[in-house]
Amino acid sequence: MWGFIYVGAFIAAFAVSAVIKLTYNPLGDKYSMHWDDSVGTVYSDLSYNEGAANKFDLYVPSDSGKENYGLVVYLHAGGFTSGDKADDVEMLQWLCSKGYVAAGINYTLFSEEHPQANVYTQSMEIRDSIPFVLEEAEKLGYHIDRMAMSGGSAGHCLAMLYAYRDAAASPVPVKMVFGAVGPSCFYLEDWINMGCDPKHPISVDSDTDYSGMAGLFSVMAGRAITNNMLMNGAYLDEVKDISAAMWVDENSVPSVFAYGAWDRAQAFSASKRLDAALTEHGVPHEYIVFEHSGHGLQNDNSQYAQFMVKVTEYLEKYLGT
């Protein structure tokens, strides 16, 4: 029972806090724009599978004369339980204005109606959607020969899974990934530190009952995880498929990511593991910590500006213009 209560409390907090920064732009008009036919065209609610949520929006630039285009996929936030591609219109329009084909993709959300949905099934839906996105772009006269993955919060988690776990099987090369505050891995010691001072984390006590955390990890992974599995380490095999950082190697793509040091909705310590893995394998990346912010990245406008500068630089360097 406590496991289900813990899961519900986590999901509620994660879903609410996930939207703060993504609906607030402290940099004003610098990364937004006036959208009209001179910039591009959007094709909405295109299908990529039979599920009700299996829809995507495709933004294509007005300049349709290039031989090849880069695709940027941006996945929405919402704690894996809420949110919609419509929430990211400004980001998708901005990406399109830079000359990229941009796609916002919905995925089946965990709910009473869809209790079997989880991070893994959502990541599989995103993986399966990409060929449909490419096919639709091709029909419209935009040949895609490279792509980038991105997103916010839950969307960032799913973007990283595609970029690190699934990139080798991608129909076109994945050149980079960027995003903010997405859970990058599920190590028990990181997640029990949520809400603690990031400079003074607590340690795992082998005598403690972590059935609540086992319930949370079970829901996220879509697999049965017990307290005993948390204690003996067997759970790590069960959460690998939803832990992007565990897939990082020397072939991983360049990355830009931002995290709040006081994040109480997901594990900030997990972002340190992501940074360490990319560093160990020599992968170019930018790890930007918002020292005074939580999951909403609400208190560090200078870091937000730095993040957007690096996103722009990496897009130009690795995806081209």
Image (tube, rainbow, N blue to C red):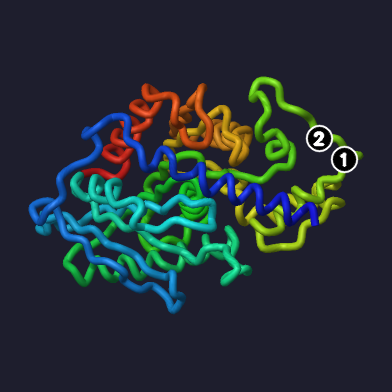
The secondary element bearing badge 2 is classed as: loop
Classify residue 134 by image quadrant: bottom left
**Mark number displayed over residue 204:** 2
Q: Residues within 10 Å of mark 1 (few under 14, many from 20)?
A: few
Asked whether, in this view, residue 138 is left or right of residue 207, the answer is left
Residue 276, compared with residue 162, is above or below; it is above
Q: Residue at x 61, y 49 (%)?
A: 243
Give coordinates of residue 197: x percent, y percent: 66, 24
**Mark number displayed over residue 27:** none
* Quarter occupied by the N terminus: bottom right
* Quarter occupied by the C terminus: top left
Give the camera-side residue of 262 and 150: 262
Classify residue 41 by image quadrant: bottom left
Give coordinates of residue 102: x percent, y percent: 28, 55
Give coordinates of residue 21: x percent, y percent: 41, 38
Q: Are marks 1 and 2 in contact (CB under 8 Å)?
A: yes
Q: Residue at x 38, y 31 (%)?
A: 307
Q: Residue at x 72, y 49 (%)?
A: 6
- Give the CA distance from mark 1 to mark 2: 8 Å
Which amino acid, by three-letter code, is at mark 2?
A: Val
User: What residue sits right under mark 1 in the picture?
Assistant: 208
